[in-house]
Amino acid sequence: MTHLINKLLAIVAILFVGACTTINTVPTKTTTGEPYDVFVICDNAAWQGDLSMVVCDMLEEDVPGLTRPQGYFNIVKQTDERGLTDIDRRCCNVLRLSIDPAYVTPSTSVAYNVYARPQTIVVVKAPSAEVATRYVESSAAALRDIFERAERETSNNYYRAAASEQLMADFKAHTGIEMVIPNNYYKATTRDKELLWYIRDYTKKAQYIFAYSYDYTSAEDLSPEWIMRSIANRLYTIPGELAGSYMGVNEDGPAIVADIEVNGRKWRELRGWWEVKGDFMGGPFVSYTTLDEANGRLTTILFALYAPEEGQRSPLRELEHLIYTAK
């Protein structure tokens, strides 16, 4: 079995510096487990040392910006080749650590939809556990990003097929931007006509999508401080359930900033915490702000989560993935 798997994955073997290759197979079985689950295949002896610690650090590092600590991924199980079951092979994310002295240098290969779909298998090859440990440690962000991109594509493919044409048309009319809006959201009424607000309610949590545009005056408008202030000013117009309460930004929360590009458009990403002033509601948010230079307008899209009793990573990731459908 080991020889067969090596032969299959050798077809798509790549170095990290190279391009990833996708196997366009269409297995009939669907994957097992939950989003962000990772199944690890590794020789038990190699796993007992430092290699297991760097893999756990890589996959289970805390996601930035959440109000409660939670890792990027969940390692659900580790086993060697002999302990594999059919259920194990069908996990949505698989990390295979292949240790063999015949490998001259460490490398990474990626395969998709081998045993089930949608599935991502990342294979790290190294001549020894020590070399694999150093390689995984130095490549942690890139390895984790392979799985994250796959999760994002799976989520967005699902919502593209279940999008609300009406809400999407409304969103484009309001912002000038096309973006997938799932059909299980509804439009909420706001006192601020410039503020668009969509809600998805669950029994014990809620997901929010906000959007608004405003005039661009100077480069300072794209500073984290100014964006955070503009978010606070918009949320202020939304009253809470208790008398005198209103939505706002938690000033003690983090201000984690990054810049991304999606479909040729640049966005400034900002992560923080929202809260209801005068009440006990709150949660994490991530915002994306872009500049339309031709029209001198800034647009901010804000994704916020209320989940006081559940994990925050997956439902917030599910929201922020939608920005990658914007065009």
Image: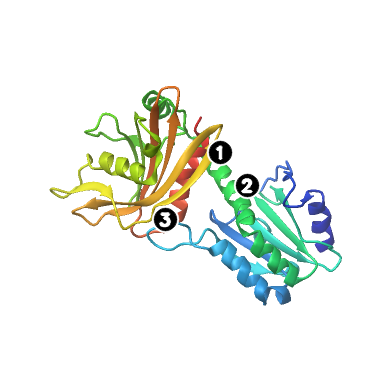
Residue marked by disc 2: 118
Where residue 65 is drawn, which disc sits there? 3
Rendered location of residue 98, percent (x, y): 76, 64
Mark 1 and mark 3 in contact? Answer it, CB < 8 Å.
Answer: no
Check disc 1: other Cα within 10 Å, few if <14, some if 14-19, many if 20+: few
Check disc 2: other Cα within 10 Å, few if <14, some if 14-19, many if 20+: many
Identity of the amino acid at label 1?
Asn
Rendered location of residue 86, percent (x, y): 69, 60
Name the secondary structure under disc 1: helix
Residue displayed at 72% across by 52% down:
16
Vertical position of residue 91 compared to residue 200: above or below: below
Query: Dividing the image into 4 quarters, which one contains the N terminus?
Result: bottom right
Residue marked by disc 1: 157
Mark 1 and mark 2 in contact? Answer it, CB < 8 Å.
Answer: yes
Is 200 on the left or on the right of 154, as rendered?
left
Q: Of residues 9 and 301, which is closer to you in this image? A: 301
Vertical position of residue 109 compared to residue 170: above or below: below
Residue displayed at 45% across by 41% down:
268
Identity of the amino acid at label 3?
Gly
Answer whether residue 248 is visible to the viewer in this image.
Answer: yes
Q: CA distance from mark 1 to mark 2?
A: 11 Å
Q: Of residues 182 and 178, which is closer to you in this image? A: 178
Name the secondary structure under disc 2: loop
Residue displayed at 60% across by 51% down:
145
Identity of the amino acid at label 2?
Pro
Q: Of residues 3 and 312, which is closer to you in this image? A: 312
